[in-house]
Amino acid sequence: MKNATARNLRLNSIVLALMAASAGPAALAQVAAPVTAEAAATAPTLPSVTVRSKYEREDLPVRAPGHKAASGARLGILGATSIMDAPVHVNAYTRELAEDWSALALQDVLENDSAVVFTTNKNHLLQNFNLRGLDMTAMDIATNGLYGIAPANSVPVEMFERIEVLRGPNVLLSGMPPLASVAGTVNMVTKRALAQPIADLTLTYGTQSYFQAHADVGKRFGDEKRLGLRFNGVYGSGELGAKDEKQSRRVGALALDYLGDGARFSLDLYSSVNKIHNGSPGMFNFLGTTAIPGVGYLLAPPEGDTNMFRGTHGTYENSGALARAEFDFTRDWQGYVALGGSEAEGKGLLFGTRAFVTGADGTTRGAIYNVHTKSERRTAEAGVIGKFDTGGVQHRLQLSANVLRHKEGTYNTPCNYCYTTNMYNPVNPPLPAAPTFGTYTTQNDFRSLAVADTMGFAGETVLLTLGARHQTVKMPLSNYSESRLSPMLAAVVRPWGNDISLFGNYTEGLEPGQVVGVGYTNTGTSLPPKQSKQFELGAKLQTGELTHTVSAFEIKRPSFISNNGAPVPTLVGDGEQRLRGLEWSMYGQVAQTVSLLGGITHINSEQRNTGRDTYGTPEWRVRIGMDWQTPVQGLKVGGRVIYTGSQWVDSGNRLRLPSWNRLDLNASYATQFGSTPVRFNASVENVADKNYWIGLFSDGFVMPGAPRTFKLSATVSF
C-alpha cells in the first residue's frame, strides 16, 4: 500500500537527496533531462523519489502548496496517511506557519484552526483549550504519537516540525491521554536532522520589551549520513502578557536518530522552564453583579493588558524523553517499540488568578493561590505493522500494546476572595505563603491492546478500517479498576477519481469513571468508565492546489449527575452532553501567488438532562487566513480574520458572552546578505486594539482578549 511503500523508500530517498545536493546543478539538470526510449529500455527500474526542499523531513507527508499545512498526518495506529485517504477530519500545520506568526507557544499556531478555542488568557503560564466543543489541557497533547511526553503547562513550538490536529473522540487511534480528554488528538512531531545541514539563528522582539534568541542546528554524519543530530535552544525574557509582567522562557531540545539498513532509532530529550514575575491578567466572574436586580451581566472589558495581580510570581519546569526503535522483519512487516516519560513541577502564584465582580463600577473581590504542583508520566508502546493481500484486497494491519502511568499532586495556600480591588484600576493583592508539597494525590494507570486493519478494495478506491482498543483503567489510590472495549469503523470512498473522497467514521473516546464520594446513597461505589461516541460523515475535495474538508458530526458524551433523590441522592450516569456540528477547513493555493488557510466550525452543544446549552461552546468559529507573494522578490504579506460567536458563560445559561472578531496581519521578507540567507518576519495581532471578552476559563469565568501585539523576528541561516 502507499504508506508502506513510502516507509520502505525512506532511506533511499534520503541518500538520493544527499547525492543530488552534493552533485550540484549540473547533475540535477541531467536528472531532469528527458529519457529516450532506447535508454529507458536498458536502464534499471528505480523507485520514484519525491523532490523535497532543504527544510523538509523525508519521513513526513510533503507540505501542501502554500506550505502552511501538510498533505498528510500521522493518525496514531493508522500511521502516516494522506489527508485525502484519512477517514477522519484532520489537519497538519507546519513549522513555516509558526514562523509566519513568530510563534512562541502552541496557542500561536492553533489560533489558525476554527475547531479550537482557548480557555486561558494569551501568554498565560498554562495553556488549556477547547477542541470541537470539548476541553483539553497541555498535558493531553501527544508527542510523536505518544501521550505523557509533552510539557504539562505551555508547549513550546520551537522543537517541533508539525502540529497535527485530529478532531473528536478516538481512543483507538492514540489511546487515553493522562487527563483523559476526549476532545481529539493534538500531536506534536519533533524536528530531525535533515538531508542538508541546518544552522539558523532567530532573534525575536515582542511588544513592549520581550527579546528572544532561538538557535536551530542540525546535521547528518557518516559517509552515508545515517546518524542525525538536531538541537534547538531558546532563551527569552522581558515584558509579556499583562502590563509590567515579566516572563522568561528557556527551552533545550536534542533529537538524535540513526537510519540503518533494516532498523531505525531515535531519541528526543527536552527541558523547558517558564517563569512569570509581577503580574497576571485576570479571569472575571459576573454572576454576583446586582446593578440590574436579580440579573447578572457583563461589564465592558478592561484593557487587554490590565495587570490584576501585580507582585505575583511563579515557575514551571518540564523535562521529558522519548526513545523509539523500528525493525524491518521483511519488506512488508515491521516491529517497533517506544518508551519515555516526563516530569513537571510548578511553584508560586500560577493560577487561581480570579476576580469576582460585585459592582457596576468594576468593584471586585480577588482570589489568588500560592501553588506547588508536581506531575510524573511514564509511557511505553510496542507493536507490529504489516501489509499483505487476501485475493484482491490489500491490508495494512497494526497491533499494539500500550501502557501509561500518570501521577499528580497539587497543594495550595489560598487567598480566597480575601481582598477588594477594581477590574479597571486594580490594587496589589496580598500574597499567601508558599505551601508544602505532600504526596501525589492522583494516579491513573492505563493499559491497552489495540488492533486496526485498513483494507483497500477495487484498486484502493474504497478503504475500510476496522479496529478496536481494549482499555483497562486503574486508579490505585481509589482502588478503582475497570475495562472497556472501544471500537472504530471508518471508510473512505473515491467514486470519481482521486480528487474527491467521501468518508465516514464511528469512533469512541474513553474517560475514567470515579469512586462516588460522600453524600450519596452509593458512596464508595465505582462508577464505570464514560464512553463518548462520535458519528461523522464528510467529503474531501481537491480543486487545483486547494484542499477542502467538509464534515458533519454528532458526539454524545455521558456525565455523572445526582438524581436529586430524598432524603439522600444517588450519583448516576444519566447525564449526557450532545454536540452536533458542521465543519469546513481548507488549505493550499488559489493562485500561484495567493495561499489560503482556515475554516468555519458550527457547533450546537446541549446538556440533555437539563435542556440547557453547554457553556463555553460558541456556535460559530471562523478562521480565514490569506498570504500574497508580492511582485517584490522575497516579499510576502498576509493576515487572518478571526470570528467567535456568542456563547453561554455559565452552566445555568444566565450570562451570555457577546461575539467578537479580530484582524491580524503579517509580512515576511527573504533576502541575502552576501551569500547568507536572511528572513524577516513581522506580525501584529488585534490590529484595531479592541477590548473584548475572548472566552471562558471555567463555569462563570470570562477572560479579556489581549491588546494590540507586535512581534518582529529575523532568521539568519548560516
Image (cartoon, rainbow, N blue to C red):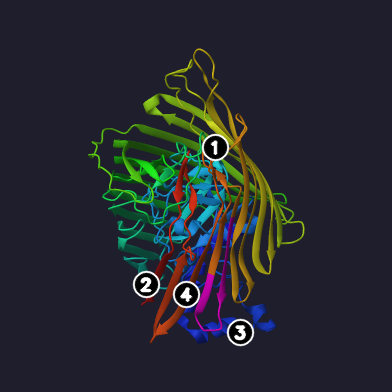
**Dot placed on the residue nearer the N-terminal end, 3 or 1:** 3
Work out which residue is located at the far top of the displayed protein and give it. Answer: 567
- Taking the image as shown, residue 672 lies to the left or right of residue 61, namely left
Distance from the alpha carbon under mark 3 to that under mark 1: 70 Å
Q: List the residue tagged with mark 3.
A: 33
Residue plotted at (50% across, 12% down): 567
Give the image quarter of residue 450.
top right
Distance from the alpha carbon under mark 3 to that under mark 4: 34 Å
Q: List the residue tagged with mark 1.
A: 654
Q: Which label was assigned to residue 668?
A: 4
**Dot placed on the residue nearer the N-terminal end, 3 or 4:** 3
Query: Can residue 505 be seen from the camera position used here?
Result: no
Give x and y (percent) for residue 614: 57, 39
Give x and y (percent) for residue 486: 58, 36
**Dot placed on the residue nearer the N-terminal end, 2 or 1:** 2
- Identify which residue, 661 or 450, lies in the foreground: 661
Distance from the alpha carbon under mark 2 to that under mark 3: 34 Å
Tag in front: 2 or 1: 1
- Identify which residue, 49 or 436, lies in the foreground: 436
Number of callouts = 4
Query: Can residue 307 be seen from the camera position used here?
Result: yes
Q: List the residue tagged with mark 2.
A: 200
Identify the amino acid type marked 3.
Ala
- Taking the image as shown, residue 359 lies to the left or right of residue 594, namely left
Identify the amino acid type marked 2.
Asp
Residue plotted at (32% across, 63% down): 233
Give the extent of the magenta segment: 622-638
Per the picture, the main secondary structure of the magenta-coloured stretch is strand
